[in-house]
Every structure is written in structure tokens, then in C-alpha cells.
Amino acid sequence: MKVIFKKSYDRDIDLFKDRQTALRIGLLVLVLVLVPFFASDYFLAEATNTLIWSLAGLGLMVLVGHTGQVSLGHAAFLAIGAYTDAALMNAGWPWLLAFLTAGAVTGVFGAIIAIPAIRMSGIYLAIATMALAVLVEEAVILAEPITGGVAGVFAPDIAIFGISFGRYDSLPNFYWLCLAVVVIVTFGYANLLRSATGRSFLAVRDSEISARALGINVSRTKTLAFGLSCAITGLAGGLMGHFFSFFNYEAFTIIISINLLLAVTIGGLGHIQGAFAGAILITAVPQVLAIVRDGLSNIGVDLSGVPGLDTLVFSLILIGFIIYEPLGIYGRYLKIKAFWDLFPLSRRDMFRRQMTYLKTERMK
């Protein structure tokens, strides 16, 4: 078992626990940078899709995992980011300015929506955000001059200083661009959690009454969390629009919101790593099912006509995690790591869930 000797309280809020952790993360980023040199176009496209889903998962994690506010409408913010980015680029804006503006517009829209939404909680907030997703979907159809309506809209290829970052003509460049955005947002997210704002998010998640007693403005904290969450999701939507190249309202249905919530829940709520683990699962399962389906068809078993097979598998995975591993994939990793770190002193009931609440919380 490794023991870290701390000489000051500043070590408690360091970005990395120790040098080995920083080295491992650096090596991981280096490996991801080198992926285009040895990966096929198909694998590289899937890796790019995973990065975009990870960015969207980070956006939802701010709200659900670190502030405790449920949302089933983040597909709407993906759509706002995608359409804003595409519309501004079609109007002649450079990509970087259009991309950042798309994130800002989505964040402001989310903060405005949060003003009435924060008065609700739990299932009522989930229903309200789901209704928002449906309204935005209809608004996209009606705003035909901007969104193309039912026909959809093309997202222009990205070009920076004359270098193309289009998905089809320069996929490695587009992958590196998505990776750079994800690394920057993740670094900012990790630093946010070390700040007073990030700690207020956690306080509101754990106990709103206790947070008020500590002097935290709960309403302002929730609104800020909504805005940041939607801004990050809007950035993911902008990249997703370029990944699709052409898209319409059907690319951002309520199913996308459910899959996004599924990703962060299975990945591990309350952990940045959980957003990446969930994104890998969401993007890998359909490919695994396609491989299994093709393999079974070779031996005479045809599953191509089975409707909703992907949704069924996702549902079974979610039920399994809720029952057997509520902490998600990253939570299971932490349990295994703790077991080996404490071996042979570890006990099976170390992570037993206990129903403990403050007396003030029982009044709700």
C-alpha cells in the first residue's frame, strides 16, 4: 500500500495525487495522440465518435454527477450547439469563433432554462428537461431558414490556417482537433472541481439544506451548473455536427438524451473518468452487437430483423449495474484498486451502501 506524505494542506487540492498519476495521464494522452498512425480509418472514426460522446458526457456529468440535478433533455443542447456552429460557419464565420459562440449560446440558453427548472427536483426535473428536448426538436423543424427544417443542414469542413480538418478528407486532423478540445475541457473541469465553485456544486448535490447553512446560494449554484453543463454539451454538439457532416432533427432525439444519461450512470456518477468509461461503452456496444450479428448470420441465425436490439442490450446493462454495481464502471475499478492496495486487510463490506441522512433531509 502506497502512503503519500503531505507537508502542506495545498497537497489536498493538487490536480494530480502524485507524480506517478501525472505520468500515467501524460502517457495516456501521448498514446491517444499516436492513434492515427497505426489505426484504420474505421477505428479512427469510432475513436473520434467516442471522444465527442466523452465531451458530451462531461457536460452532463457537471449537472448530474457533481450537482445532483437530473436531466433527460441534453440532446436539445447538443442540437443547439450543432445548429449554431453550422449556421455561423455557413454565414462566413471562422470555425474557432463559431465553435466558441455555439458553446456560449448554448450555455446562456441553459442558464435561462435553469431559472424555472431549478424550482423542481428529481423526477419532475427529469420530465421538464424531457419536455424541453421535445420542444427544441419541434423548434428545429419550424426554424427552417436557419436549420433547414426537415431537410437538414450541412456543416462545412473545418479549416484553420489553410489546414483542413474535415472528417472525410482529413480524418486524422479532425481526430486530433477533437482530442485537443476534450483534453482542454477535461483539464478545465478538473480544476473547476478544486475551486470554491466546484465544491459548492458538490455541497448542493450532497445536501441542499446543509449547503444553505454554509452560506452557499443554492439557486445561483444550480443555475451556474446548468449553464456550464449546457455550454460543454454545446461544444460537443458543434463537433458532432461536423462528424455527421449533414444532419437534421432526427440526429438529436430523446433517445440521445437517454443514452447520454445511461453513459454517465454506467460509467460512474461523480467521477470525470466515468464520462469516458460510459462513452466507450455507448460507442462500443453497437459495434460489438454488429460483429456478433454478422457472426451469427454466418451460421444461419439472423438477428437483423429483431427491432430495438441495441436498446434491449443497453437496458439490461443498466439494470445489471444498478443492481450489482451502483457506482458504475469506474466505481468497480476503485473497489478493485482498494482491494489490492489494502490486501490482505481489505474487507468485503468496505463499500457497503448505508442509508444515512441528516435529520433535516428527512423533512423533505
Image (cartoon, rainbow, N blue to C red):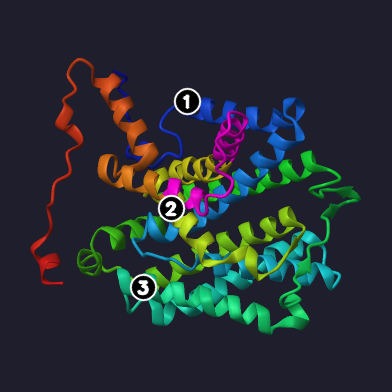
- The image position of residue 203, as x and y in percent, is 29, 59
From the image, state whether disc 1 or disc 3 is nearer to you.
Answer: 3
> CA–CA distance between discs 1 and 2?
33 Å
| Residue at mark 1 | 19
- Which residue is the extreme one toward the left? 359
- The image position of residue 158, as x and y in percent, is 82, 55
Q: Is residue 348 above or below residue 176?
A: above
Are dots 3 and 2 in contact, CB under 8 Å?
no
From the image, state whether disc 3 or disc 2 is nearer to you.
Answer: 2
Start-end of magenta stretch: 287-314
| Residue at mark 2 | 262
> CA–CA distance between discs 1 and 3?
41 Å
Task: Name the residue type under label 2.
Answer: Leu
Closer to the chain start, of discs 1 and 3, is 1
Closer to the chain start, of discs 3 and 2, is 3
Considering the image in quadrants, where does the N terminus appear? top left
The residue at 65%/39% (across/down) is: 47
33 vs 239, nearest the viewer: 239
Kind of element beneath mark 1: helix
> CA–CA distance between discs 3 and 2?
17 Å
Q: Main secondary structure of the magenta part?
A: helix
Q: Residues within 10 Å of mark 3 (few under 14, many from 20)?
A: some
- Which residue is the extreme one toward the front? 300
The residue at 54%/39% (across/down) is: 289
Q: Residues within 10 Å of mark 2 (few under 14, many from 20)?
A: many
